[in-house]
Every structure is written in C-alpha cells, then in structure tokens.
Image (tube, rainbow, N blue to C red):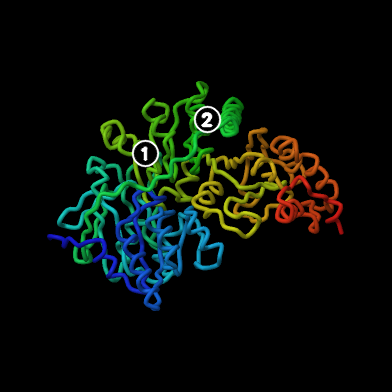
Amino acid sequence: MAFTRITAAEAAALVKNGDNIALSGFTPAGTAKAVTAEIAKIAHAEHEAGRPYQIGIFTGASTGQSCDGVLSDENAIRYRAPYTTNATFRKHVNAGEIAYNDIHLSQMAQELRYGFMGDVDWAILEVCAIEPDGKVYLTAAGGIAPTAARLAKKGIILELNAFHSPKSIGLHDVYEPLDPPQRKVIPIEHPGDRIGTPYLQIDPSKVVGVVECNLPDEARDFKGADPITDKIGENVADFLMADVRRGIIPKTFLPFQSGVGTTANAILGALGNNPEVPAFNIYTEVLQNAVVDLMRKGRVLSASTCSLTVTNDVLQGIYNDIDLFKNKLVIRQSEISNSPEVIRRLGVIAINTAIEVDLYGHANSTQICGGKMMNGIGGSGDFERNAYISIFTCPSVAKGGMISSIVPFCSHIDHTEHDVNIIVTEQGVADLRGKSTRERAQAIIENCAHPDYKQLLWDYLKIADKGHTAHKLSAAFAMHDTFLREGDMHLTNLASYVK
C-alpha cells in the first residue's frame, strides 16, 4: 500500500479543537515534532480570530520545545500527561493554565487503554522507515507508540524523519502486554532479553499521511560534572562496593537504573571507572551519554532502555557504529522498561535524584516548596518502589547554600519512607535499611546534611513531639516558610514556630 505524502501543515489541519493526540517518543528522544509545531501556528491563528483551540496531549514522557514549549505559549494545551521537564510548559502549569496529570510512566499506556483519560483521536509517530504492509520502525525511543497507534480513532500521522538513520532498525523490541484479566507474565529474565518485534505493526488503513522531515532530536546537553556531582558519584560507588564485600550484592553485580541529569551521568561514570566494580548491565528508562561511553569501553555489558536520551552527536555515533551496539542495546516501550514486575525480578539497583529529602526518608522529586512543579515524577517511582536497593541522591544544599536539601519534613512527597533505602549527598551516605524513624533521622543529619544546617536539624529533632515519627507540626515547614519570606533557610528561628 502506498501512503500519501502530506506536509506538516496539512497534517496539523486535521487536528481540531478538543481533539486528543498521542505522540511517539520518550523525553525529547524520538518525539514527533514537525506536526506539533504547525499545530501551534493553527492555535495562534484561531485565538487571534477569537475562536477556541485547545487539545489534549498524551506522551511517553517529556517532549521538547517544538511540542510542550510552543503549544504552551499558544495556550493550545487543555490537558497533558504524563512527565514533562520543559521550562515553558512549567511556567504555564504553575500559572494554573494547563490541566497537568503527573503519573508514573509505567502506567501511562495502560491507563489510556483502560479509558481513564478519554479517547485518543490521533497518533503522531516519528519513524525512520515504513513498509507498505504497515510495519514501521521507530527512532530513538519506544514510549507509548503501540498503544497510541492502536487506539487512534481518527487516524495515524507518520513523521518520516531522515535525521534518524535506518541503520538503527533492529534496536527496538516492540511488545504490548495484554490487559487484565488476560495479561501474561512479561518474559524478561535478563536485561538484554528480546520478547517482541523490531517493528511496530500498524493498520495501513489508519495512516492518513506521511510527513517527510529532517529534524534533530531536541536533546538536552546537560552541564558537565563538578566536584559535588563527582563526590556524590564516588559515595554511591563506595557504598555499593561495601555492600558487595558484605555479600549483600552479588559479586557479579546487579543491573542498574539511573535517572536523567548531570548527577545521574556522574554516578554511572564513577561506577564505570571504579576498577573494583565489575562490568555490569543496565535496565533503565533513559540512556545517557555516560552509558554509551561505558558500552564502548566494555564496562557496560548490555543496556535496556526506553529512550536514547543522549546528545545528537552521540546518537549519530550509535547509528554509525551500529554493529557494536545492535547486540548490546535494546529499546523498549515505557510500560516494559518501567514494569514493576520486571524491575523486581531482575533485582535492579535504582538510583534517582531528589529535590529534597526529610529526616525520615521521604523524598520529593517534583515540587518546589510544596506547590511549584519543577518536573514530573517520571519513572522514579516505578523503579524505587520495586528496586533491590532504592537510592536517592541530591546535593546537600542548593541556591548557593540558601536552601538545605535535607529538611524536617518534605514540602511534597513523591516517595514515602517505605520506598527509600539509601540517601546520598556529597557529605556522605545514610543507610536507612533496618532503622527506626528516629534512627533514620539521626543517620540522615549526621551523614547527609550540610554542616551549615546540621545544628538547625538537630534542634528540630529536639523540639519534635515524641511518637513513632517525631514531629512538631507548627515547625515542620519552618525552613521552607523562612525561605519563602526571607530567601534563606539559614535565617530560620525554630523558637518562633513552636506552639
């Protein structure tokens, strides 16, 4: 079957006010981007004419400026789920202009199939190759593409993006699980296992057009490592090797998951460069530059991911060296890469970044001072709750020392004390396993808090009401309150909050 070629503008014109679109991709990697940029232009024109125009957007994870950014600026997003990191989108969400639903990434595709979020009208998928019978080959990410394509009621738009080389064919493992009560075991017993097909099979009759483009991924080039992130990485590596020596972690090691960002890159770099650490496997949702380098060096044996969240030069390097990577690298859908079942079976060691951690081990990874969204929860909950060892990392202070990342009580809780085993800052490591709440608090203050804030945190613990979890509710958010009023947590006077 020959598919009709259309322009991005013609494709965008099909999407009407009130429609819901579902996109390929996971992080900006592999996200459809030509059509969404044209939808923003339509929204601008409609609003200029005094007519309403807003759509719902379903994705695998975050997108780039050509989707979340421009559509937010044109007030074109009514509803959006799940994860996002775009600064423009963040501004409009925090202004109350977008209905944003932040859910665990492992749940996104199935909640669409369950009908929890309404209909999917259009699927817009980025591909690197198309066959006449409806076999399409995804680019740099798996995301929710199979579910998006199957549920699309009005049709599928394919963005055939020449930036992504067809050499990458074979990296994907496309597998969509059945829904309850027919769901079967996901048969992954090793990070590199393949259980699906290298292509996504779609119904050719649903394809309304193919948009040819040549657009690079809108990859974020994270800032380089610094002494703080290097020390955090060193602390994580030292802790894990101590657990190996104690026999808690097998000498052959276990697979790693690491979140996105500079600290995550530094941690994996430290692990890979530590001569004590044996070569290891990766089972994760995002693959960053550091892992690609370690794969080239033979320090990472295999890597399973949902997206190649790498800079474009590194991405092209993978395509150019496909013979090296094709048997070591597999790209999955988010509900497989983030599957609690598989994470627990493989014994994944999960390492993610927190904005703040409190004295009892709760972690906040999404909100600033309780209500301002910084980013979505992503897949950290999928991994941390089901990990063999659950690790959260953060610098001990932020904003030049005016904010302590260790606080009496988190202003927003994404991960409860029940799901967090280890806290790591550049100051040290707090091992919370097997400890009571008061023992946890003591370990976190002593090992992870910045020296400038240790006494303030000890003082809070002294005034806290006794109980299983010691708290003084009138003073629990004193540090946050002081920062919002004075711009510096150092200025906190706990006595003024005690009632």
Which residue sits at x=42%, y=58%?
A: 68
Tell me residue 211's x, y (percent): 23, 58
Residue 71 figure quarter:
bottom left
Q: Nearer the viewer, mark 1 or mark 2?
A: 1
Visible in this render: residue 402?
A: yes
Q: Crowding near pointer 1: few (<14 within 10 Å), some, many (20+)?
A: many
Distance between mark 1 and mark 2 Cα atoms: 19 Å
- Give the left or right position of residue 173, taking residue 7 as reference: right
Which residue sits at x=81%, y=53%?
A: 467
Tell me residue 213's x, y (percent): 24, 53
Element type at mark 1: loop
Residue 385 lies, with reference to residue 101, above or below; the image says above
Residue 351 lies, with reference to residue 25, above or below; the image says above
- Report the residue marked by disc 2: 250
Q: Quadrant of the C terminus?
A: bottom right
Which residue sits at x=16%, y=57%?
A: 133
| Residue lying furthest front | 48
Visible in this render: residue 243?
A: no
- Give the left or right position of residue 341, taking residue 426 as reference: left
| Residue lying furthest top | 275
- Report the residue marked by disc 1: 192
The residue type indicated by label 1 comes to: Gly
Q: Quadrant of the N terminus?
A: bottom left
- Give the left or right position of residue 105, taking residue 130 as reference: right
